[in-house]
Image (cartoon, grey):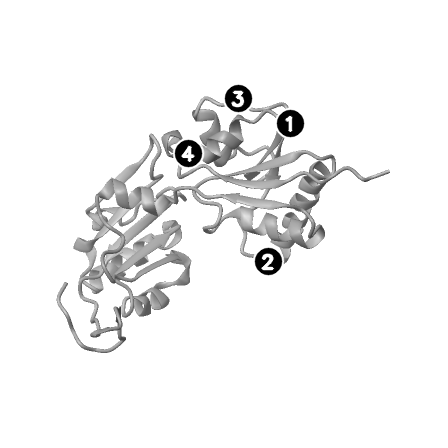
């Protein structure tokens, strides 16, 4: 007797929060009636931001659904245990032949819990078919809201968590025209002071909960000193002071030759 074929695992990107930014492909996945929905929560019985995007779009929560706990921690030993538990929960569904949709805010390939889940499932069951449905990241929604191109012509862009620290961010300015700093909440005052030292306050903008009804845009970044902001916050920084090298075969050759923007 042949074993029942495994179901598929699909990471469904839902965009940063505006239901209108859900792609047609993701919408088609969510409209299927034969799938099990899984979604990340920070702790047991907590709300899921990813799930809330789907519900705000007018979709009904299917009978077959399950939250998966992905705690806010930097302890890899602790996280590995939760990744394994989540993967085993998903695999139990996949082994029944069900397709599992894992709902993700933003884009499933960019600083996403889906990467951890997919890798762990693949390690446990390499034969599982895993698909990623791309979506709109928060920094693209923020740039559009600000009417600020992330890059033009041969510009360079760095997208990093602010937790890299001020010293690392300072070094990045030597090589990048645009910095996108994610998860700025813990270091916001330090970042504002750093932007002031580097004379970049006028070239920076803050966006909180991009693409949601609660979206907040602050162009006077210095006004944020002392504020407690939402976890879903970022800074876009343009660096007109960057020294750029001459063009070499269509690309910039790294050098100290200044060039005005």
Dot 1 falls on a residue whose secondary structure is loop
For the residues labelled 1 and 3, the Cα–Cα distance comes to: 11 Å
For the residues labelled 4 and 1, the Cα–Cα distance comes to: 21 Å
Disc assigned to residue 76: 2
Q: Quick check: marks 2 and 1 in contact, CB under 8 Å?
A: no
Mark 2 vs mark 3, foreground winner is 3
239 relative position to 39: left or right: left
Q: Residues within 10 Å of mark 4 (few under 14, many from 20)?
A: many
Q: Residue at x 15, y 70 (%)?
A: 259
Dot 4 falls on a residue whose secondary structure is loop
For the residues labelled 2 and 4, the Cα–Cα distance comes to: 31 Å
Residue receiving disc 3 = 60
For the residues labelled 4 and 3, the Cα–Cα distance comes to: 15 Å
Residue receiving disc 1 = 64
Mark 2 vs mark 4, foreground winner is 4
> Which label's residue is closer to the chain start, 2 or 1?
1
Q: Position of residue 179 (x, y in %)?
A: 30, 58
- Asked where in the image residue 159 lies, by quadrant, the reply is bottom left
Residue receiving disc 4 = 22
């Amino acid at each position: 007797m042949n074993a029942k074929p495994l179901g598929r695992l699909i990471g469904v990107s839902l965009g940063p929060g505006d239901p209108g930014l859900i792609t047609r492909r993701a919408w088609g996945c969510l409209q299927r009636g034969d799938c099990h929905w899984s979604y990340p929560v920070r702790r047991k019985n907590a709300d899921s931001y990813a799930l809330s995007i789907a519900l705000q779009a007018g979709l009904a929560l299917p009978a077959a659904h399950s939250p998966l706990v992905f705690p806010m921690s930097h302890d890899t030993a602790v996280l590995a245990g939760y990744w394994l538990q989540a993967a085993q929960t998903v695999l139990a569904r996949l082994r029944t032949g069900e397709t599992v949709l894992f709902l993700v805010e933003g884009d499933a390939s960019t600083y996403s819990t889906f990467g951890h889940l997919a890798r762990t499932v693949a390690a446990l069951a390499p034969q599982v078919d895993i698909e990623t449905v791309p979506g709109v990241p928060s920094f693209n929604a923020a740039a559009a809201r600000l009417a600020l191109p992330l890059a033009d012509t041969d510009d360079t862009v760095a997208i990093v968590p602010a937790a890299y620290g001020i010293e690392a961010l300072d070094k990045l300015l030597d090589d990048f025209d645009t910095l996108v700093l994610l998860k700025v909440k813990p270091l916001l005052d330090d970042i504002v002071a750093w932007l002031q030292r580097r004379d970049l306050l006028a070239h920076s903008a803050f966006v909180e909960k991009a693409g949601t009804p609660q979206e907040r845009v602050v162009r006077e970044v210095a006004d944020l000193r002392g504020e407690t902001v939402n976890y879903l916050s970022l800074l876009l920084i343009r660096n007109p002071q960057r020294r750029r090298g001459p063009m070499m075969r269509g690309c910039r050759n790294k050098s100290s030759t200044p060039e005005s923007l």
